[in-house]
Structures are given as C-alpha cells and as structure tokens.
Image: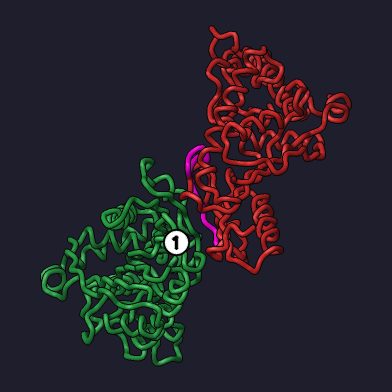
Chain colours: A green, B red
C-alpha cells in the first residue's frame, strides 16, 4: 500500500456508524492493520451516520486516550460526503442492507407486488421480491458511486451485511426468518384488535439481503472497484431473549413511527416475539440455515 | 495562494464553533473568499468545539443545500485536533479569550492575587491582573502550538476576540466594564442574602482581554506564524436589554454550575444587570471606550 505516500495521514471513514462500541473496535482494527505495515502515520477517522444520529452520545463515547483524530460527518452515505480522493479506507457494518426507500409497489394495493399481511418480502409474491431487489440495485449504485469519488486509487472498502447464499430462496435466510416472526406477531396483534390490519399491510421493513452474485453485479456495474474478498462469515445464533432484544433495538424507531407504539405496546409485542422465538427454537433457531453475514472487501481501481 | 495545488480540496476549521448561525456565515465567507481566487476546489469544513457542545443541534442547523463537506470535531483546541499540515484555513470567533483554567491565585485567600468581592480581574490588584495575564500567555502557547502542526505552509488563520488597546488599563475596556456590572449585581444579591459572600469570592470568570502587543508577543514566542493583519474592529454597542441577554447567554452555564442558580434566580440576576446597564447608559454605554474586537490574521511560515 503506497496510496498515501504523498502525505503521512491515513483517512478512514465508518459509514452508518450509529453510536455503539462495535464501531470503536472496528476503528481500532483498522488502525492496527495499517500500523503493522507502515511507519506510524497519523490517523483521521470520520464517523458518519444520518443527521438524526446521536452524535453527542457518539462523541462522549470516544475513548479520551484515542490515537486518532476523530470527526463526525452527518448525512446519507448515498451522497458524496467527502472530497474527491480523500479517503484511504471505508468501513460499513450492518448499514448497507437498509434500503433508502421502500419499494412503492409493496404498499400499493393495485400492484401485484402488494405485500398484504407481511412486513418483509422474503415469503411474498415474486413481484414483491423483484421490487425489493430492484430497489437494492438502485441503492447499491447510489452507494458505490460516491465512494468511487471519495476513495483514493488503491484505497480499500470493507463492509458487512446480512446476506443470503446465491441461488437459495430469500425465505431460507435466518435474518429473514426472524423478520417473518416479527411480522406474524404484528398480525397476532391485529387479530387481538390492538392494531389495525391496514396498518400492518402498509408496514414494510426497508431491508434487503443480497447474495454474493448480486453484490458482484453491483460492483461490476459501477466499474470503479475490484472485488478482493467476498465471503460468508458464520454468525453464532442468538438465544431467543437476546434475539428479540436485537430486533427491538433495530426496529424500535420505525415501529414507533409507523404504529405510534408507546413503551407498553412495544413491550407487549416483544414479549410475543420472544415467545415465538422460544417456541420455534428447535425447528427454527437450531435447524434452519446459518445466520449469514456477507463480508465484502473492495479495492478502488 | 498555491498552498493546495497538490490536491483540489480546501480544508477549513472553525474552532470553538458552538451551534449558532454566525458560524455558517463565517464559513460562507471563507468559501466565497477562496472561490474568487481559484478554479472551484472542493471544500471540507470542520466544526470544532468541546465534546460537551451540542453537535446534534449544530448538524441539524447546517443548510441542506450547503456546498461544502461538513464534519464535526469534538475536543479542546488546546490540543492537536487534526493531522499535520492538513488545514488550509482556521477560523475562531469569540473563543480564544476563554482561559483554559482560572488562575488559582485568584481564588486563594492566602495569595496577594486573591480576587475578593470581584468576579473578574480588570479592577483588581495588580497581582490578580498578572495572574490572569500569565494564564493567557500559557493558553496562547497551547493554542498556537497545535495550530502550527495542523496548518499547511502558507495556510491562514483568522480569529476575533474581545480585546483592549495596548497601554490602556483593563478596566477601560467596554467588555470588562460589563463584567464589572455583572459582578456588582452578584454582590448586590449577596447583600440581599440571596447568595453567600464566599460563593461570590470564589467565583471568577475565566476570560482575558488581550492587547495587540500581547497577541504579537504570543505569536513571536511561538515562531511558526507571521502577523499579516492585527486591527481593531469597532463594534456597535448593544442596548441594555440586548446586552444583558448576551451576558446571560454567555455565562448562564457557568453561573448555574457555580451558584446552583435555578431559572428564577437567574432571571432575578439578569433583571438587576439589565437595570444597572440602563441606569449607567449615559456614563457607561455611551461615553466609555469603544466596544473593541481584536481581529488577528496570521500566516503559517
């Protein structure tokens, strides 16, 4: 790596960083990796997330004894966030699977892609799956294009997303199965009269699990990166309580916004989710397909 | 200015930015100034303040149609905040006059610099003035040294602070006179039994108004910058109500912290301040020395 020979600064960005400690670990890993192969450069690390992210919390969570210069960058990573050729390394963990927008056909009663009674696409009509897939392709384009501007020649980008194996149905993916259960619990709440069926029909989670094949197609279509590594990372499955907590943390905001849930109703929903995870643990948590994360490592060519 | 010929990015930082709209104006001015003399570069603007600053508010206040890449940088500007030789322009408005710490002699009963019955140094014993002056010199050193690292050769730094003319007593400076009145109102509150005299004795505002001579000495002592411009900017004096509001906004935090004031007591104090400003408007607001801001423009040599 001679990509930053003209300066002694190594600039890295974490896209979709949120506020958690995982990010800090990722940053330390980045720094350690570069330190091992170079005379000590100075590190500048940019933490990016939507403007609505709690950057105050992020900044107070940064270790005071950090050995890098930190900066927060607000805004969508589907736009250019940094000057041209200014980053040496970009990292993103569990963010790129979130779609920029819901495919509008999925909530359009008159469309064959209408996703009635479901909150995700994985067990839906082929038209709904296609609509999600098309949106993901659009979003990968708007993710890769700004990165091609920002990353220096020979610069690197690593990201991790929940994925599904090429050629297998979306419904087999563990992540998607957990969303199916979340959806069925929302239908249960509609059956109990706690929420309206219409609200459930209009609720869809804007997340898509890509296959390696789709990722490769997106990178090829962009044309500015070579694929250095694309592989599955096996993830230990969580126990029902932990899994329900993860789902709650991940979707609390969007559930509150769409359904107007208060803490009590949200608690009731997650009690249902947790119970179903537990009931199905033999057939679902233990025997079904691996919890798969797709690790993608690209080089700017 | 050929200082960024090797890259097409112009990097600027605003130190002690807080969250207000003034900063955005300053940024626009920076950008306009550079645009007029160059083929359009890309701009990256770093907004710096203490980690406790409300960066969330700052980020949501940034205009969505901005033509620069924005980043927030938490931390004290008395340490290195950016990689070496990475900034082309640094700006700071009304921040450098804040001392990093109170001179400890000022609140030490056994010291001749003990600032009994006052909250600022300008009418105090020479020893108290000296203690403030010495702290300012230390702080300028710890402000200029990191900047010398961060700013590129030929890079520029502009800052504005409330100042006082070389060779005149500190007590003549308008800014200091307003603090004297704030102090006298706190003594009034002690006389009324609302707060203890001891609390007043132990309260000192950590701000120092430098003269051009002192600024020049600090720059010379540092040795990495040339003084391009050092001049007074006349500032229109505010009317009593506006002036009292400014003081309230500036010192609310520190007053709450030291005296444990609630909103009601704080309101009472500012009512007193406002009244005194009004009473003294003929002798004080109109006839006394100019409200002076010192504008300092340095070049990295």
Q: Which residues are magenta?
A: B69-80
> Is B289 in front, or is A238?
B289
Q: Is residue B77 rendered magenta in the image?
A: yes
Crowding at label 1, few (<14), some or many (≥20) Cα neighbours within 10 Å? many
**Residue drawn at (32%, 68%), measured in percent from left and top?**
A159
Give the number of marks: 1
Q: Using the image, determine if residue A255 lies above or below residue B224.
A: below
**Residue drawn at (41%, 58%), measured in percent from left and top?**
A11
The residue singled out by tag 1 in the image is A49
Left or right: residue A261 versus residue B116 is left
Give x and y (percent) for residue B42. 58, 65
Under circle 1, the secondary element is strand
Give x and y (percent) for residue A236. 17, 64
Q: Quadrant of residue A122?
A: bottom left
Q: Chain of mark 1?
A: A
**Residue drawn at (74%, 29%), measured in percent from left and top?**
B164
Give x and y (percent) for residue B270. 70, 30
């Amino acid at each position: 790596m001679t990509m930053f020979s003209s300066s002694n600064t190594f600039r890295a960005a974490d896209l979709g960083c949120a506020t958690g400690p995982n990010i800090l670990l990722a940053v330390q890993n980045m720094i350690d990796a570069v330190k091992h192969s170079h005379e000590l450069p100075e590190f500048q690390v940019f933490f990016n997330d939507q403007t609505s992210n709690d950057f105050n919390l992020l900044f107070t969570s940064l270790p005071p004894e950090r050995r890098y210069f930190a900066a927060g960058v607000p805004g969508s990573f589907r736009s250019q966030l940094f000057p041209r050729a200014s980053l040496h390394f970009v990292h993103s963990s569990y963010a790129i699977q979130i779609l920029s927008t819901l495919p509008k056909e999925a909530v359009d009663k008159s469309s064959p892609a209408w996703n009635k009674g479901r909150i995700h696409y994985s067990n839906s009509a082929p038209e709904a799956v296609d609509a999600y897939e098309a949106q993901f392709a659009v979003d990968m384009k708007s993710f890769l294009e700004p990165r091609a501007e920002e990353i220096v020649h020979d610069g690197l980008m690593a990201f991790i997303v929940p994925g599904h194996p090429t050629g297998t149905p979306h419904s087999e993916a563990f992540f998607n199965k957990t969303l199916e259960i979340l959806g069925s619990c929302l239908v249960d709440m509609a059956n109990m009269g706690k929420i309206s069926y219409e609200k459930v029909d209009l609720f869809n989670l804007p997340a898509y699990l890509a296959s390696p094949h789709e990722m490769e197609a997106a990178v090829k279509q962009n044309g500015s990166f070579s694929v250095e590594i694309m592989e599955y990372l096996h993830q230990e499955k969580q126990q029902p309580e932990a899994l329900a907590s993860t789902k709650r943390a991940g979707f609390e905001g969007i559930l509150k916004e769409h359904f107007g849930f208060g803490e009590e109703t949200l608690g009731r929903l997650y009690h249902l989710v947790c119970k179903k995870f537990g009931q199905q643990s033999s057939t679902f948590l233990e025997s079904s397909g691996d919890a798969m994360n797709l690790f993608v490592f690209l080089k700017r060519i």
